Amino acid sequence: MTGPGAAPAGTGPAAPPASVDPVDPVDPVAPVGRADTVDVWLIPTDQPEPVVRALRELLDPAERARADGPDRRFGRRFTVAHGAVRLLAGARLGRDPAGLVWRYGPHGKPGIDGLAVNHSASGALAAVALTEGRAVGVDVEEVRDARVAVRMARRYFPAAEAESVAADPDPAGRFTVLWCRREACVKAYGGRLVQGFGLPLDGPSPVLLADPGALGPGPCRVEDVPAPGRFRAALAAVGAGPVTVRRRIWSPPV
């Protein structure tokens, strides 16, 4: 596989690798390569065995070792997520996806020369954000138990946000939105999650975080990204200026 439209050997012609969700407001003509345009791809990671095998061929030795751990379902999803990220980044850069070499920040944030890239995975869904010239972070989470959500909000969020979670008709969903915003913001700066717990990130999307505190200098713009079913997602971009988010659904070659 040499790009998003490449087919695994012996499987015949490739189908289009992605589709735009028709209910999502996407600007299909927003120019690629601008710092204020971010592509966010949602990647369903439960894929057929031929797709998993083909994507595995793109991984580096460290990625394969992690995929080969004792949890087979995790390994398959990891393979799909990381293989798809390589396909998308390689296509954006015009390079062989299997030859991409990641560089990592002090807290594990991945990157590659010429492209700001960040990815996240939860359950059967992954997300990747790609852009040029502007640091970004993305997070996707599956909504879980409401009682756990309320307890975690009271432990980790500012008091006003914790109360808003407890009072929400869907406390687990609201907690997950706020958690995704925190994770995305922390990842945009390449920091540690603990640095994001006290950030004021409640309110309608997008949220402009004027002061990220210890995470780094300069403001951050945090925006919810529509996700299917019981998933929530968020994008953060360092800088005060607005971003054009092009949300797409990745689908594999067939």
Image (spheres, rainbow, N blue to C red):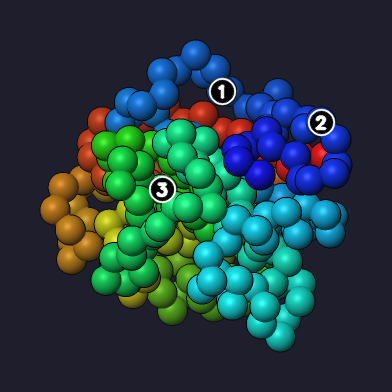
Give the residue at mark 1.
26
Closest to the observer: 194 or 168?
A: 194
Which amino acid lies under the numbered mark 2 shown in the image of this protein? Answer: Pro
> Where in the figure is residue 2, as x and y percent of width and height?
60, 41
Q: Within 10 Å of the Cα at label 2, are there few (<14), some (14-19), or many (20+) other Cα atoms?
A: few
> Where in the figure is residue 124, as x and y percent of width and height?
72, 59
Q: Which of the two marks, 1 or 3, is nearer to us in this view?
A: 3
Residue 167 visible in this rendered orientation of the protein: no
The residue tagged with tag 1: helix, strand or loop?
loop
Q: CA distance from mark 1 to mark 2?
A: 27 Å
Q: Residue at x 21, y 45 (%)?
A: 219
Q: Residue at x 63, y 37 (%)?
A: 4
Which amino acid lies under the numbered mark 1 shown in the image of this protein? Answer: Val
Closest to the observer: 217 or 145?
A: 217
Q: Which of the two marks, 1 or 2, is nearer to us in this view?
A: 2
First in sequence: mark 1 vs mark 3 = 1
Give the residue at mark 2.
13
Which amino acid lies under the numbered mark 3 shown in the image of this protein? Answer: Val
Q: CA distance from mark 2 to mark 3?
A: 29 Å
Q: Within 10 Å of the Cα at label 3, are there few (<14), some (14-19), or many (20+) other Cα atoms?
A: many
Determine whether, in the image, residue 64 is placed left or right of residue 128: right
> Where in the figure is residue 42, as x and y percent of width and height?
62, 44
> Where in the figure is residue 147, as x and y percent of width and height?
65, 75
Q: Quadrant of residue 72?
A: bottom right
Give the residue at mark 3.
117
Quadrant occupied by the C terminus: top right
